[in-house]
């Protein structure tokens, strides 16, 4: 039975690699999805490991990547992440999860984007030469509001198989604009706001060989959304990943049982771009200090990632602090994330 299982997993991996290679030969897909804020990594650990998250578990932030990872929590975990995104945009994420015994693990999530204020402009059709050269008039300011709030659940099905789901309500408000309605023949104040229900689903399987595991997730599955007469899809993404502690292969690993060197590899199939590859590494010492690094392949701007983490526990409770750096090239610069969290183990 084990041989059959290993054979099936190897075949699945070869199929995934073959599919990725075939897809790379397809025409490039650009800007084919809306609400892109749903794609931003939440949590410094995952971001520092190059976004390789399908087979990585251990915190409440798993609900944003592969919700099956929540099933590994032993008590309560809460994390808050602030991200200094590109173009002076801020991204915030909050995840809280708790284990309800054999029933499973439940979680709450919230993400929010802060774009600041924008200057509202309208076309100028008058006769003033200076304004005609400018081409527009200013009309105050407006702001963009984007957020998603969700519920998640995960459970261990067998000794090696885990599943999880994440159900979210996502909203995007781009502000109001005055347009000419050709049907009514008059100008109307058009509200540019859409709401949608989003579902994420994930699985994780431990092979029984050391801690080798495979993960799969489907994120941002939803109906289409509409702005006035324009329809768009959300950023549906498929992930397949594998992860393992390499030091578990050594008879006498450096640092003994107190050290772990996890390597994670993800193949990602997004709706709005070509296939991508994420590689991540994490070295942990005594489950207290962590050094992380990674790389994102087939991105226009993103590439190298790195980060650190510290976890301190006492009498079943603890705190953690994590930082992640992401290189977005010469044009956008760097993206920095800071995650703070608390956790508690079940008695």
Image (spheres, grey):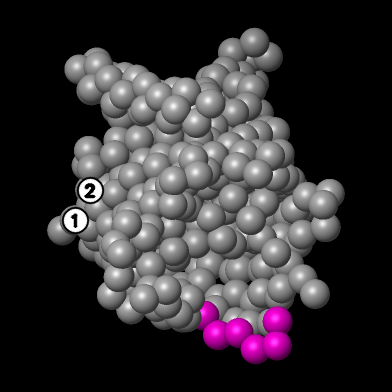
Residue 140 screen position, x and y as percent: 53, 56
Q: Which residue is mark 2?
A: 301
Q: Is residue 339 above or below residue 65?
A: below
Front position in the image: 95 or 121? 95
The answer to whether 285 appears left or right of 185 in the picture is: left
Front position in the image: 47 or 110? 47
**Label 2 SS:** loop
Front position in the image: 181 or 191? 191
- Residue lying at the far top of the rendered structure: 183
For residue 140, say whether it is visible: no
The answer to whether 324 appears left or right of 189 in the picture is: left
Is the C-beta separation of discs 2 and 1 under 8 Å? yes
Residue beneath the point at 33% across and 78% down: 255
Which quadrant is the C terminus positioned in? bottom right
Residue 59 screen position, x and y as percent: 59, 62
Quarter of the image for residue 225 reads top right
Q: CA distance from mark 2 to mark 1?
A: 5 Å
Residue 233 screen position, x and y as percent: 52, 24
> Residue 118 shows which numbered tag?
none
Q: Which residue is mark 1?
A: 329
Q: Is residue 78 magenta?
A: no
Residue beneath the point at 44% across and 64% down: 45
Q: Which residues are magenta?
A: 311-316
The dominant secondary structure in magenta is strand
Characterize the local packing of mark 2: few (<14), some (14-19) or many (20 or more) Cα atoms within 10 angstroms.
Answer: some
């Amino acid at each position: 039975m084990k041989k059959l299982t290993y054979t099936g997993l190897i075949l699945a991996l070869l199929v995934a690699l073959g599919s990725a290679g075939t897809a790379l030969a397809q025409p490039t897909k650009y800007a084919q999805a809306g609400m892109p804020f749903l794609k931003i990594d939440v949590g410094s650990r995952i971001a520092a490991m190059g976004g390789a998250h399908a087979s990585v578990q251990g915190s409440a932030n798993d609900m944003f990547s592969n919700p099956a990872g929540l099933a590994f929590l032993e008590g309560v975990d809460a994390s808050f992440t602030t991200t200094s995104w590109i173009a002076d945009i801020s991204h915030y994420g909050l995840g809280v999860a708790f284990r309800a015994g054999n029933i499973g693990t439940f979680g709450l999530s919230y993400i929010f984007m802060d774009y600041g204020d924008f200057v509202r402009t309208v076309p100028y059709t008058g006769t003033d030469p200076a304004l005609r050269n400018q081409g527009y008039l200013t009309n105050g300011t407006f702001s963009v509001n984007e957020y998603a709030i969700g519920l998640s659940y995960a459970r261990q099905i067998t000794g090696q198989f885990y599943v999880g789901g994440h159900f979210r309500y996502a909203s995007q408000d781009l502000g109001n604009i005055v347009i000419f309605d050709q049907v009514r023949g008059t100008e109307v104040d058009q509200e540019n706001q859409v709401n949608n229900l989003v579902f994420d689903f994930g699985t994780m399987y431990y092979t029984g060989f050391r801690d080798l595991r495979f993960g799969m997730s489907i994120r941002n599955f939803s109906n289409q959304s509409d702005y006035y007469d324009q329809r768009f899809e959300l950023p549906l993404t498929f992930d397949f990943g594998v992860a393992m502690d390499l030091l578990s292969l050594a008879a006498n690993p450096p640092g003994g049982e107190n050290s772990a060197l996890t390597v994670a590899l993800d193949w990602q199939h997004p709706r709005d771009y070509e296939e991508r590859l994420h590689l991540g590494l994490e070295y942990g010492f005594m489950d207290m200090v962590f050094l992380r690094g990674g790389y994102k392949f087939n991105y226009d701007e993103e590439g190298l990632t790195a980060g650190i983490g510290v976890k301190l526990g006492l009498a079943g409770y603890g705190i953690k602090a994590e930082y992640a750096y992401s290189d977005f090239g010469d044009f956008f610069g760097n993206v920095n994330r800071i995650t703070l969290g608390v956790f508690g183990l079940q008695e």
